[in-house]
Amino acid sequence: MRQNSLPCRSPARFGPSGTPLAAALVVSATVLLLTMAAAPSIAKAQTSPEEAHEIVRHVDDLLRGESSRGKVRMEVITDRWTRTMEMEMWSLGQAYSLVRVLSPSREAGTATLKVDRDIWNYLPRVDRTIKVPGSGMGGSWMGSHFTYDDLVRESSMVDDYEIEVSFEGERDGAEIWEFTLIPLPEAPVVWGRIELDVRKSDRMPLESRYFDDRGELARTMTFSEFRTMDGRLVPSRLSMLPEDKPGESTTLLYEDLEFNTGLASSFFSLQRLRGGP
């Protein structure tokens, strides 16, 4: 009787860990391919926390420098009316700011002064100086979509927020950083979170998105029309778009801007607020 013969199989070969050699080779090749694919992203330099703070500080100080003076046109569009104001603005570091309305005539002389944490308004039609409470910093300035905090820079993105890089790469055809800013405990700020997009090629801000305490988008500010003023590249057009009022906006157009003007802290006085020398 013939016995059924089974095909002869070569004995399985094993790798050092006991895995069949063929399977081990497949695993090794897969790991190698994944490593090679990941290598460019691993090798790519990522922005350090120190550099992130430096970039955000650059944006924070971009339009004021150590000291500054500028002429600005503000255009306000609402669903009921549109108006334009001409203003002159002065600043010294983060502690001192003065904004004075030049036109229209019915509002000329209206001014806002910041000295450290104190802020005052001057109303020339009634010749009255009013101190703005801290709770009023998020209020509308002159009926615009900018707040007092926006105009006189009460808060600082570097000093009052924790900064992290939430995106780094290409978006809409440009290499950018996206920074997410979370308020530090007890920081005197209005917003629950800010997202800031900065162009890598020249560190110009492109967009800021402001979220309330519930995490909902409240408004967006865009930066455009980049120009060199007094030797510094700056965005000359800033537009604020409220999320809850589609079609409305406030735009600041910088017509003239000077830096390192030699202003002294004594310039920022209540007498100057009222239009005095």
Image: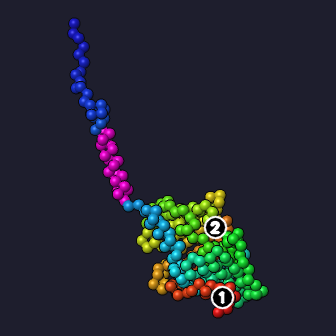
Which one is in front, 115 or 211? Answer: 115
Residue 136 locus on image (x, y percent): 70, 71
By secondary structure, the bulk of the magenta-drawn segment is best described as helix
Residue 129 locus on image (x, y percent): 73, 83
Residue 15 locus on image (x, y percent): 27, 33
Disc number at residue 272?
1
- Identify which amino acid the numbered label 1 is placed on: Arg
Is 121 inside the magenta-drawn segment? no
Asked whether, in this view, residue 11 is left or right of residue 183, the answer is left
- Identify which amino acid the numbered label 2 is placed on: Pro
Q: Quadrant of residue 16?
A: top left
| Vertical arrangement, residue 162 with respect to residue 276, above or below | above
| Vertical arrangement, residue 6 with respect to residue 94, above or below | above
User: Circle 2 — which element?
Assistant: loop
Q: Which residues are magenta?
A: 26-44
Q: Are marks 1 and 2 in contact (CB under 8 Å)?
A: no
Instruction: Name the N-terminal-most of marks 1 and 2.
Output: 2
Disc number at residue 262?
none
Is 35 inside the magenta-drawn segment? yes
| Vertical arrangement, residue 201 with respect to residue 107, above or below | above
User: Circle 1 — which element?
Assistant: helix
Q: Residue at x 37, y 56 (%)?
A: 41
Q: Quadrant of the C terminus?
A: bottom right
* Mark-to-mark CA distance, 1 and 2: 26 Å
Q: Quadrant of the N terminus?
A: top left
Dot 2 corresponds to which residue? 188
Q: Residue at x 63, y 83 (%)?
A: 98
Mark 1 crowd level (few <14, some 14–19, many ≥20, 10 Å Cα): some
Mark 2 crowd level (few <14, some 14–19, many ≥20, 10 Å Cα): some
Q: Residue at x 25, y 18 (%)?
A: 6
What colour-coding does the image apply?
A: rainbow
Q: Residue furthest top?
A: 1
